[in-house]
Amino acid sequence: MLALDTTDATRSQRLKAATRDSHGALDARIMAGDIFASRAHFARFLRVQFRFHRDVDALYGNAALDALLPDLGERRRLNQVAQDLQDLEQALPAPLSAPLSADLPLAAALGWLYVAEGSNLGGTVLYKMAGKLGLDAGFGARHLAAHPDGAARHWRSFTAALDSVPLTAEQEQQVIDAADAAFRSVHAHVEQEFGQ
Ligand code: HEM
């Protein structure tokens, strides 16, 4: 279990601090996989994204979460990842485990959604790099394209809502544990896809 930061940072700032090491390790692992060496390499990354977004997809359809978080239904990216794979003539990966239930407890759902939504920020960096492979918002890199409002603004509207959900101290820890579990799960998808 990760330690809970007791400063008066916002919830999203605490999440960022608590997951800095797991995010750094994941970034490094993905970039070491040389995902922009070819479209075939990039497809491995797409399969990781597909598995991750399939894991979280049901949360985007949860009415209670939708009431708390802005435009939640429009934020889901599973279909875009699937289209990116289809653009590259790749089969959709078979499930390795059951996806998350739409009824996941609120705190855990917020932690997973923090990771899924935050990954759009790094996505803007990856989107530019995908251009070298001839991929863009219309072909192969749809799910990495920034929201029309701008990725940073779209993210801030999410974190503002995330930060204002009232939670108990116990739930605060559950959000952090869930975000950590989300990063570990993506890392496991990477190991599965990229090999040791
Ligand atoms: C599927 C894999 C990934 C996940 C789940 C993920 C997750 C996240 C999250 C949650 C944030 C928000 C941090 C915050 O609270 O501000 C973030 C930001 C960011 N990520 Fe990633 N990320 C992934 C892959 C990558 C990769 C491969 C790179 C590039 C090497 C990258 C670079 C960044 C950058 C530059 C930011 C914004 C700068 C910052 O605030 O740290 N990410 N990512």
Image (tube, grey):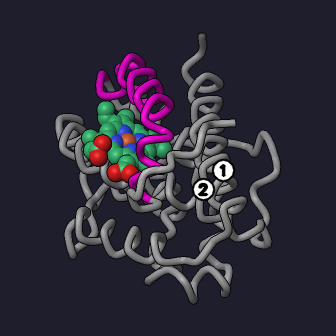
Q: Is residue 52 left or right of residue 117?
A: right
The amino acid at mark 1 is Ala
Question: Circle 1: is it few (<14), some (14-19), or many (20+) Cα within 10 Å?
Answer: many
Question: Which stretch is magenta?
Answer: 12-37
Which residue corresponds to mark 1? 178
Point out the tag, 1 or 2, that comes first from the N-terminus: 2
Residue that numbered label 2 is attached to: 112
Residue visible at 18% across and 44% down in the picture: 128
Q: Decide if residue 20 is on the left or right side of residue 168.
A: left
Q: Secondary structure at mark 2?
A: helix
Q: Are marks 1 and 2 in contact (CB under 8 Å)?
A: yes
As drawn, is 4 to the left or to the right of 140?
A: right
Q: Is residue 114 above or below residue 74?
A: above
Position of 52 relative to 137 (above/below): above
Give how far across and how far down residue 17 sits, in percent: 42, 42
The kind of secondary structure the magenta stretch mainly shows is helix
Nearer to the camera, 115 or 196: 115
